[in-house]
Amino acid sequence: MVTTPPASASTHDEASALDRGPAQEIRPPAEVRFADELAVLEAADRAKGSELPPGWRLSPRAVRAFVVGDAELGVRRKFYGDDPLVDRAVVSLLGRQGLMLVGEPGTAKSMLSELLAAAVSGTSNLTVQGTAGTTEDHVRYSWNYALLIAEGPSERSLVPSAVQQAMSAGKVVRFEEITRCAPEIQDTLVSILSEKQLMIPELGSEARVSARPGFNVLATANLKDRGVHEMSAALKRRFNFETIKPLTDRQFEIDLIEAQLTAELGPASERPPLARDVLDVLVTAFQDLRTGATSNGAPVKRPETVMSTAEAVNVAVAASLEARYLGDGTVTPAEVARQLAGVASKGDEEDARRLRHYVDNVVRERARRDPRWKSFLSAAESLWQ
């Protein structure tokens, strides 16, 4: 008989935390975070008698509303940018072609894929993460080797991949950063997208998994980054490509950052004040460095680091945390400048020189007539000496 000692208080607390499960997650999946909105959209579909495509949780109009918002139903906008792109993405998922979202890092490709999968299939967790170490087993299936040795190939010893599970259930499977995988691993999808079948020859010549209605592949790719692999022409033909571009609308970007701050740190009443004029400094600096020019056309040396909206959100969150725990409780352009340093250079000396050039030639000129930029300059000068 095996006995265990009484649990200590700390052990009991840890066990209780584990028991609470999803409530303790830092970032639950979209279908959990926005469960109330998905339920509202489902109810609206039923009330209108909307036609649902086979295998879909929501109607195409409701999927669109989930992503871009619907004020009448109280559904928040979650993707800021190109609304017609969202329409095209929804239509792609209705058809036989897969959907490929491409763009620079930080342009919300993964977020959009998660939202679409949650709205269409009710789950965004059927995901393959593309890396240099991704193998064919991750895309097709693998085996429980203990059972395989004991019993031989059987359905019991088969371990289905996320792709196989999506095919069997008629759901959308996400393939993140597909171009990080070797070309021969990418091409495993060619027959799956073409035939909508997955052969399992180990179980017999006729053994296969046939996709149910609702199955599709939603992939993301960064086609310009270092370390990516070119996709074959055969695989490209199986996807409809949509390019997500960085935000250029200043107000859109400010609104998005404010929304993300609320999601990360709570409503404005519960976090350090971050005025819109301070957010304007943050967004202006990012857009200058992102585009290589100021709004009045002055040239700016662009850093190699991608100055995406996602990175701007990170700076805003970090500046808020600095103000709360190390400052006086109010976010100023000085906090923005200090936190921007860790995002923009990433330890690259050439990028540091570009940032010094930006501070010396753009920020200093603005600081002569704008106290916000003077505050930014006072903090930035010591960071890129």
Image: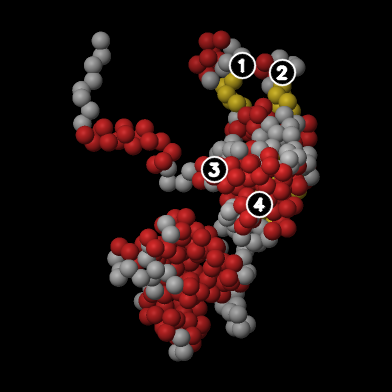
User: In the displayed structure, would residue 133 be above or below residue 151?
Assistant: below
Label 2, residues with CA under 10 Å away: few <14, some 14-19, many ≥20: few
The extreme bottom residue here reads 368
Residue to which mark 2 is pinned: 207
Q: Are marks 3 and 1 in contact (CB under 8 Å)?
A: no
**Distance between the alpha carbons at the discs numbered 1 and 2:** 10 Å
Which is nearer the eye, 202 or 80? 80
For marks 1 and 2, the one nearer the N-term is 1
Label 4, residues with CA under 10 Å away: few <14, some 14-19, many ≥20: many
**Distance between the alpha carbons at the discs numbered 2 and 4:** 40 Å
Local secondary structure at mark 1: loop
- Residue in the image at 62% along x and 29% along y: 165
For marks 3 and 1, the one nearer the N-term is 3
Q: Nearer the viewer, mark 2 or mark 3?
A: 3
Q: Position of residue 99 (x, y in %)?
A: 71, 46
Badge 4 amino acid = Ala
Q: Nearer the viewer, mark 4 or mark 1?
A: 4
Badge 1 amino acid = Glu
Local secondary structure at mark 4: helix
For marks 2 and 4, the one nearer the N-term is 4
- Residue in the image at 41% along x and 36% along y: 21
For marks 2 and 3, the one nearer the N-term is 3
Local secondary structure at mark 2: loop
**Distance between the alpha carbons at the discs numbered 4 and 3:** 14 Å
Return the mark for residue 65: 4
- Residue in the image at 58% along x and 15% along y: 156
Q: Position of residue 284 (x, y in %)?
A: 53, 74
Q: Position of residue 309 (x, y in %)?
A: 55, 63
Return the mark for residue 155: 1
Return the mark for residue 205: none
Name which quarter of the figure residue 52 lies in. Answer: top right
**Distance between the alpha carbons at the discs numbered 3 and 1:** 34 Å
